[in-house]
Structure formats: C-alpha cells, structure tokens
Image (tube, coloured by chain):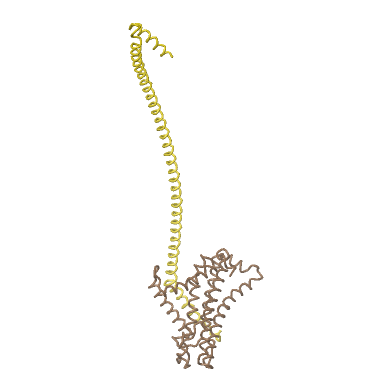
Amino acid sequence: MEITLAAEPVARLGDVVITNTMITSAIVVLLLLAVAAVYRARLSTDSPGRFQSLIESVLEFVLNLCEATAGKELGRRVFPLVCTFFVFILTANWFGLLPGFSAIWVVNFEGHRVPLLRAANSDLNMTLAMALIAVGTVQVLGVTTRGLAGYLKELATPLFLAPIHIISEISHVISLAGRLFGNIFGGEVLLLVMYSILPYVVPALFVGLEALFGFIQALIFTVLSVVYISLAAGAEEAPSAHAA
Amino acid sequence: MEKLGIDLWGLLWQAVAFGVLVFGLYKLLYRPTLRMLDERAQRIRQGLADADRARRRLEEAEREYVARLEEASREGQRKVSEATQAAQRLRDEILAQARQEAAALIMQARQQIEAEQRQALEEVRAHIAELAVEAARRVVRASLDEEAQRRLVEEFLADEMRQ
C-alpha cells in the first residue's frame, strides 16, 4: 500500500497527464450539471416537489449565509461562486465516501497499478484552484470597490505593514487550500488504514465521521470565502462583515 | 511542489472544471432559482399587502357600521321623542277641546234648565193664579163681585211675586 500526496496519473493524452482526481472532479462536475439540468426542467414556482424543495433549501441556506455576511447586494452578487464552492466541495467529499469508490484499480501508462478514482479534494491542485479563485475574487472586488489606488493604499497603510498585508492575502490561499486538502487527504488515509487493519464494521463509523467532516469542511471553505469577500468589499457594502 | 502534487496543468484543469461548473450552475440552477425566489417573495409581499389592505377595509367598515348604528339609534330616539311630544300636544289639544265642549254643553244645559224653569214658573204662576181665582171666587162669591175679587187676587199675587 503506497500513499502519495500527489494524485496518481491514470492516462496520458500526448504530453498531458490525466490524474485520478481530475477524472473524479470531472465526474462530479458532470453529475452536478446533470442534477441542475433535471432541476431546471422540473422547476415549478407554484408546486415544488421534494427534489426541488431539497435543492431550494440548500440554495436558500447558502444565500442567507451570503446575505447575512456580505450584505444583500454583494451577497447576491457573489452567491453563484460561493454556492458552487459549497455544493462542489460537499458533493466531491461525499462522492469519495461512496462504497466501491476506491475499489476500481487500473494499470496506468507507467505500468503502475493505481486507483481509477480519488477524492477530488485530496488533490492540492483542486483545493488550490478553488482557493485562488476565491482570493482572486476578493482582490478583484477590492479593486472594483475602492479603485486600484484605494486598494493599493489600503494594502500599504501603514507602509511598514505592507509586506504583512501581502503575506496575509497569500496566507488566505494557503489556509483555504491546505485546510481542505489536509482534512480530506487525512480522512482518505485514515479510511484506507482502517480498511486494512479492521475491514469490518469499524470503518463504517469512520465513514460517518468523514461524511460529517466533509460537510464541515465545505461549510468552513464557504464561510471563509464569504468573509474574505465581504471584508474586501468594505464595511459600506458588507454591514455584518465585522461580526463575521 | 512536485512532491505535493502541484503542477500547472492539474491546476488549470481543476480551475477550468470548477469554472465550467460555476457557469453551468449559474445558468441552470442559480439564475432560475433566484428569479423564482424573488417572484415568490414578491407574491408573498403582495399577499401580505393585500391582507393588510383588507384588514384596514374591514376596520373601516366596522367603524362605519358602528357610526351608522349610533346614528340610527340617535335618530330613533329623536323620533320617539318627537312622537312623544306630538302625542302630548295632541292629548292637550283634545283635552282642551273636550273641556271647551263640556263647558259649552254645561252652559247650554244650564240655559235650557233656566228656560224650562222660567217656563215652569210661568205655568205654575198661571195655574196658581187660576187656582187662587177659583179659590177666591168660591170664598168671596158670596160677598164680593167678580171685579173686586180679581183685584184682590192680583194684589195678592203681586205681593207674592215680590216676596
């Protein structure tokens, strides 16, 4: 049993290497788009079914979170991005806990036997991409709200703290990406070890725990993103940002 | 970086996959849902406003009803009072008229009685005179002539009438 931080390569298209986390994230994206397409087709204003009510309740939960943290206008503007963070991270985390998820193994182009699928958030590329998008949005909002001069002025006020501010912004990326990756990767390793040591009953308890942690991590990533965004947009647009 | 598994291609793949998801969910999920939630909220606001308007109308109607009831009560009391006064006036008029008529009747009766009394007295006097003449004639037939007897009787009657 070999445990690697990096995602395992599964296939190669020319010079491009396809890893198992790329396959998983693509499947999760397609799955969510399919669910959204079904939801869109069945959408009814007057008589929502259980499926629609479930999805509506999730969206309203995130929308309320956005509006409460970043204010009504800004909260609505960033809602699509923030909600996608929550939905994707949660689905990807729970998708990795499905029975048989890690049971499919293939021999890759290097002749190594590797799992075909691996939890998308156990790849730093995935969590880093999302963290960069979140913090990138924060910077863009900071510039659009205050103007480039105002943004730079705030970053360099007081001047001797400018490096600290820049490091702080970078640390947001590292903390967002590292926290999610660490938890999901750690959970995967824990489950793998548990399956190896005690293959019956006991791993089920850890699967339940991982499901809970998966939800918590999705929530933490989402909440922190909204808080960073609301702070970047300033107190005028985000009345409750200080409380967060 | 390589040991952590971070590479530019992997990063780009995941970022693009996430971007596609954001775009797809925005089109399929977020936009229609937000529009629907807004419509629903608008409908709820409209319903609440309608209910508030209906409540105000009801309160206004209740106030109007109470006012009309009080007005009707006042009008009823006024009419009863007017009717009572009219009845009182009518009663007084009837009583006055009755008194007048009664007085007239009494006066008429009294005059009639007096007339009848006078007539009776005349008749009685005439009758008494005749009786007296007759009596006197019988008494003095023997001593007085008829002329003397009549004079004496007339004098007697005149004295009697004066008394």
> Which quadrant of the rendered structure holds the N terminus of chain B?
bottom right
Q: Nearer the viewer, residue B160 or A13?
A: B160
Point out residue A5 in the picture as x, y percentages from the top left corner: 54, 87
The answer to whether residue B28 is left or right of residue B11 is left
> Of A25 and B119, which appears nearest the observer?
B119
Of the 4 image quadrants, the one containing the C terminus of chain B is: top left
Residue A81 place in picture, x, y as percent: 49, 72
What tint does the image give chain A? brown
Asked if residue A103 lies left or right of residue A156, the reply is: left
Q: Position of residue B47 (x, y in %)?
A: 43, 61
Q: Quarter of the image holding residue A109? A: bottom left
Q: Nearer the viewer, residue A134 or A16?
A: A134
Q: Residue furthest front?
A: B142
Above or below, B82 against B137 in this view is below
How many callouts does the rendering have? 0
The correct choice, above or below, for B73 with respect to A169 in the image is: above
Q: Which chain is drawn using yellow?
A: B
Measured as percent of width and height from the top left, residue A207 is found at 51, 86
